[in-house]
Image (cartoon, rainbow, N blue to C red):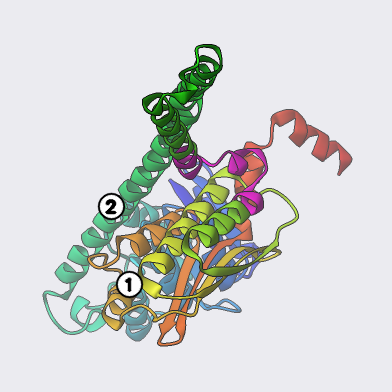
């Protein structure tokens, strides 16, 4: 069981650590000192249970609960509070919390609370059970409704994991096919073209129209194979990085469509490969939408990396996305735009966000991945000896 603890008082965080430290297979995966910190760390560390103080700076526990449940729906939340108030309990459960522990009962109740909400069941502090109808709206069936909603959230989270797995599989298949086209079929076609050139010079076939047509056909096949292999698995992305690969894509897009594209890349260092791949695929999808639907003559693309994280922005001056599609996107539906849904799922895996603004003057897309996720991914790909060297330098 992975547990996040959020409280602005070190003493309470230490107390929670003391209560859970001896439980087998339990670990404190993150600690937060305010509500915003809790939301960020929950998005990155994906705890099973988050234990939040209701009174925290920046975001209080209820606001943080709502944000955590939206960004990390698999994470269950326990509210810690000194308030034995039916109204406070009602607000906590409306925000998405599943457990409510009074601070005076932490030593006795917290273990049971974590176990209970870890099974996606509700928990109130022992010896203080407010009437269910008072807490949950005055209807006998409300608790059952909340349980059903919890099960729906679980299934949604499972589907999101499945979608992320499919996207990874798709990326892997694209890379494999692209490399096979470039290294296998592409090389064989290049060899055929070379042999035909030699035959035309040595045997006088160069004057034969059928032979000449065959040479031109092989050259066209080779050019299309190279173009397709680069689209599926751009070598620049792996060898040089996102900025170079994105510039290649933008130039190729402008040449093929006649749409003018202004680009800006502000990124000093390489991003983790999975992040670069996600941004590259999102950019590819966004440019495809501009080509197929926007009717635009001008577009802008920018990638920035700063202290807040990495941001990809794509803007066009086209006709905009239809209001119906935008409404479905806001509701999380995918019936009209699988591409937009795929973009959002790619970002969701990294705790990222996708914002889209659209109107009659054009569309703006903004994809963001937080700095915490990027640092975590970079630390995982750093070899042990490099980590030791960094520690020694520090």
| Residue ID for mark 1 | 329
- Identify the image quadrant of the N terminus: top left
CA gap between label 2 and label 1 equals 17 Å
Q: How crowded is mark 2: few (under 14 residues within 10 Å), some or many (20 or more)?
A: few
Would residue 218 be visible to someone looking at this image? yes
Q: Where is residue 28 in the image (x, y as percent from the top left)?
A: 54, 49
Left or right of 370 on screen, residue 339 = left
In the rendered structure, does residue 369 fall within the stretch colored magenta? no
Query: Which residue has dot 2 on it?
Result: 159
Task: Examine the rendered structure and indicate whether residue 154 appears above or below residue 226.
Answer: below
Residue 74 horizontal side relative to residue 357, left or right: left
Q: Of helix, strand and loop, which mostly describes the magenta segment?
A: helix
Tag 1 secondary structure: helix
The magenta span reads: 227-245
Task: Locate the C terminus by quadrant.
Answer: top right
- Residue positioned most to the left: 140
> Percent from the top left, x then y, of residue 80?
46, 69
The picture places residue 349, in percent across and down from the top left corner, at 45, 53
Mark 2 element type: helix
Who is closer to the viewer here, 348 or 108?
Answer: 348
Of the numbered discs 2 and 1, the one sitting upstream in the chain is 2
Q: Within the image, what quadrant is residue 250 found in?
A: bottom right
In this view, the residue in front, 216 or 231, is 216
């Amino acid at each position: 069981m992975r547990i996040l603890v959020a409280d602005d008082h070190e003493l309470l965080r230490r107390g929670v650590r003391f209560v859970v430290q001896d439980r087998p297979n339990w670990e404190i995966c993150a600690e937060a000192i305010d509500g915003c910190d809790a939301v960020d760390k929950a998005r990155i560390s994906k705890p099973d249970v988050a234990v939040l103080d209701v009174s925290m700076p920046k975001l209080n526990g209820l606001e943080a609960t709502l944000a955590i449940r939206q960004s990390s729906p698999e994470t269950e939340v326990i509210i810690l509070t000194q308030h034995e108030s039916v109204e406070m309990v009602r607000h906590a459960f409306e925000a998405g919390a599943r457990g409510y522990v009074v601070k005076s009962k932490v030593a006795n109740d917290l273990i049971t609370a974590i176990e209970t909400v870890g099974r996606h069941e509700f928990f109130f502090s022992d010896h203080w059970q407010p009437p269910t109808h008072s807490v949950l709206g005055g209807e006998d069936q409300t608790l059952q409704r909340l349980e059903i909603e919890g099960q729906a959230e679980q299934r949604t989270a499972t589907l999101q994991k499945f979608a992320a797995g499919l996207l990874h599989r798709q990326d892997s298949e694209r890379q494999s096919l692209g490399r096979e086209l470039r290294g296998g079929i592409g090389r064989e076609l290049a060899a055929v073209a070379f042999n035909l050139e030699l035959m035309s010079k040595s045997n006088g076939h160069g004057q034969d129209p059928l032979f000449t047509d065959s040479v031109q056909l092989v050259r066209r096949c080779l050019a299309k194979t190279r173009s397709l292999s680069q689209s599926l698995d751009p070598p620049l992305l792996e060898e040089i990085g996102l900025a170079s690969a994105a510039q290649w894509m933008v130039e190729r897009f402008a040449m093929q469509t006649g749409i003018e594209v202004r680009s800006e890349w502000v990124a000093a260092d390489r991003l983790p490969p999975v992040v670069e791949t996600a941004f590259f695929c999102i950019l590819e999808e966004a440019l495809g939408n501009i080509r197929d639907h926007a009717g635009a003559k001008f577009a802008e693309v920018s990638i920035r990396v700063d202290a807040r994280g990495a941001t990809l922005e794509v803007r066009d001056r086209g006709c905009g996305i239809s209001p119906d599609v935008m409404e479905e996107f806001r509701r999380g539906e995918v019936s009209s735009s699988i591409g937009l849904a795929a973009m959002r799922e790619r970002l969701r895996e990294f705790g990222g966000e996708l914002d889209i603004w659209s109107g009659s003057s054009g569309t703006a897309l903004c994809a963001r991945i937080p700095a915490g996720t990027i640092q975590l991914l970079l630390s995982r790909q750093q070899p042990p000896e490099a980590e030791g060297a960094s520690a020694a330098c520090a």
